[in-house]
Image: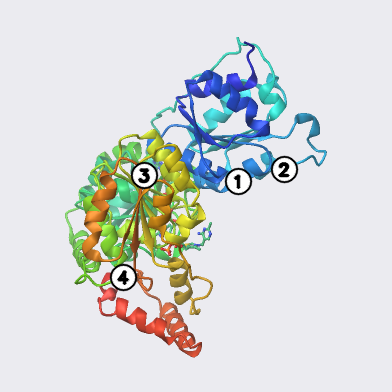
Amino acid sequence: MSFTVSDLIIETLKRAGVRRVYGIPGDSLNGFTDALFHDGAISWQHVRHEEAAAFAAAGEAAITGQVAVCAASCGPGNLHLINGLYDAHRSRVPVVAIAAHIPSKEIGGFYFQETHPQELFRECSAYCELITTSAQLPAVLDIAIRSAVEQRDVSVLVVPGDVLLSKMERTTPITTIRPSMPIVRPNDSELDAAAEALNSAHRVTILAGAGCAEARAEVFALAEALQAPIVHSLRGKEFIEYDNPYDVGMTGLLGFSSGYHAMKNCDLLLMLGTDFPYREFYPEGVTVLQVDLRGEHIGRRTRVDVPLVGTVRDTAAALLPRLKMKSDGHHLGGMKGHYAKAREGLDELAVNDHNRTPLHPQFVARTVDEVADSDAVFLADVGTPVVWAARYIHMNGRRRLIGSFTHGTMANSLPQALGVQASQPGRQVITFSGDGGLAMMFGELITLRQLNLPVKIVVFNNGSLSFVELEMKAAGLVNFGTDLEDPNFAAVASALGLHGQRVERPDDLAAALRTAFDFDGPALVEVMTARQELSIPPTITREQIRNFTLYATRTVLSGRGDELIDLAKTNIERHILTGGD
Ligand SMILES: Cc1cc2nc3c(=O)[nH]c(=O)nc-3n(C[C@H](O)[C@H](O)[C@H](O)COP(=O)(O)OP(=O)(O)OC[C@H]3O[C@@H](n4cnc5c(N)ncnc54)[C@H](O)[C@@H]3O)c2cc1C
Ligand SMILES: Cc1ncc(C[n+]2csc(CCOP(=O)(O)OP(=O)(O)O)c2C)c(N)n1
């Protein structure tokens, strides 16, 4: 049989460790899918929307750390990949997308389905090129895979259908591309400058992010030497929060008041592997040191005095011998005390309130946390599910927490879960899905059945776009356009061939979750949760108070005062303010 461009792509992907391709076949992609079929070593993961293919590849790449692949046909087919690819790009996970293209002789001729994918995908990729002749291979293919692997980013290969089918020499060399693990640290004089600043500071706070994944021991050693509380970002949570004697919680709007104060009250902030984006949570007038593997990320969130380019692990290891051990534990002790109080306040909200309905989402999250496996993978939809996952899921070094934390798109968890589960058979994979989020990518429930992926979907059905309602309240706006008239999701899931169960009473929750988690196949538990649940930020500005008052006044004036009564019932009775100051 003759050897084609598609065959070479497949051989190269296999050498890079790829075992699955997510996508939807069609016209221009048929040469590639036919070659996959004949090769048989890479499995085709058929989804129902190309966006899900990109998310699934991103989910697989996030959980395995290896390059994952999605593919789509020309024009609208690959256009659908874009949101998932943006997510992979922003989450820095290695994904290669094969974007099939219209026949090469028609390019530029306003042909049926013509788009310009290499322009469309440029912004969400590290590398994006059009292949017009087999002579470009294998060089372009190698660059694409290496860019994805080394930059932990997206590469897009735009290949016209006729090129995918075109013949080439079987002898073309195939490269094996695997990630490298270089040692990267600042030079000695940069380290000396950092040590001098750290040694002369009195109240050091560490802000630790996802870049600390491989450096727990080093980060804790720094905290001990500096007597520094460790605040974490949301993406740092899974690596830093657990078994951490220096932990004072998360910062940001979803964070803890202790995280906020530890940042604001320091005289030196040491940022380790974080790109935490919210400027208003950074302290002013303090010395800032930032360690990041990507030098271009340094200083883009707050002014930085000492930039340090390197991995957290290597930089911390080189820095530690230069530090004088601090003996004053006042700052650390004070912040830890603050954290204990804030944590207690949040935990009080996560209880079964005398079997009262609707269920409080905090209680739902806490119960899932208790029932889930010790190595479960959690995926949270953007919306209030992120809030509950951030505050109530315990990590332990074996569990994982994945979301669309940087791109911030709705409806991420179900399609990401496809890729996580496909690459981790036998592991418990649980989504925290919003009712809005689930409906947005509903078709992927069918994928779960078709691919027999035993993902467990927990739907927080609050009948609204609740996160947006919170934003509107904080901005002084009457809630508008946020109602959701949902079907009975559990019944729909059952009709699709999943295990489906609806939970309306807190007493029934744990048993329903256990049944679903033990079920040998995909399962959905729909929990009827409170709509008017305020998640109070760690600090409240005068403007937010003013806006909330405005929202309340406008809501009454618009004849919807009942909403306020519901809100008061749900929140004030439960001392919701204990989470913040
Ligand atoms: C609805 C919603 C609400 C949110 N609210 C909050 C909130 O309240 N608080 C919060 O923290 N986040 C929140 N987020 C998430 C937030 O948007 C960011 O995604 C998150 O704060 C980023 O975390 P990070 O800095 O750890 O990760 P990233 O943004 O991924 O940054 C990691 C940094 O580490 C660097 N790096 C990687 N590896 C290494 C290494 N080995 N050594 C050194 N450097 C390395 C990278 O170059 C990068 O600069 C929210 C998201 C959503 C969707
Ligand atoms: C694709 C997309 N559309 C819109 C938004 C704006 N947005 C953020 S959260 C949210 C509501 C999510 O609703 P749901 O999934 O029901 O979760 P809830 O907040 O109600 O728990 C919306 C509309 C977004 N982030 N992404």
Q: CA distance from mark 4 to mark 2?
A: 48 Å
Q: Which-is-in-front pick, marks 4 and 2?
A: 4
The disc, 1 or 2, on the residue closer to the chain's N-terminal end is 1
Q: Secondary structure at mark 1?
A: loop
Question: Which amino acid lies under the numbered mark 1 shown in the image of this protein?
Answer: His
The disc, 1 or 4, on the residue closer to the chain's N-terminal end is 1
Residue corresponding to mark 4: 358
Q: Which-is-in-front pick, marks 2 and 3?
A: 3
Q: Is residue 510 left or right of residue 34?
A: left
Q: CA distance from mark 3 to mark 4?
A: 25 Å
Question: Which amino acid lies under the numbered mark 3 shown in the image of this protein?
Answer: Pro
Q: Secondary structure at mark 3?
A: loop
Residue at 55 percent across and 37 percent down: it is: 23
Q: Secondary structure at mark 4?
A: loop
Question: Which amino acid lies under the numbered mark 4 shown in the image of this protein?
Answer: Pro
The answer to whether the residues at label 3 and label 4 have Cβ atoms under 8 Å apart is no
Q: Secondary structure at mark 2?
A: loop
Question: Which residue appears farthest toward the right when viewing the image?
Answer: 109
Q: Quadrant of residue 140?
A: top right
The disc, 3 or 1, on the residue closer to the chain's N-terminal end is 1
Q: CA distance from mark 1 to mark 2?
A: 12 Å
Q: In the drawing, what numbered circle is on residue 115?
A: 2
The disc, 2 or 3, on the residue closer to the chain's N-terminal end is 2
Q: In the drawing, what numbered circle is on residue 522?
A: 3
Instruction: Where is residue 213? Give x, y as percent.
Output: 33, 41
Residue at 47 percent across and 45 percent down: it is: 446
Residue corresponding to mark 1: 80
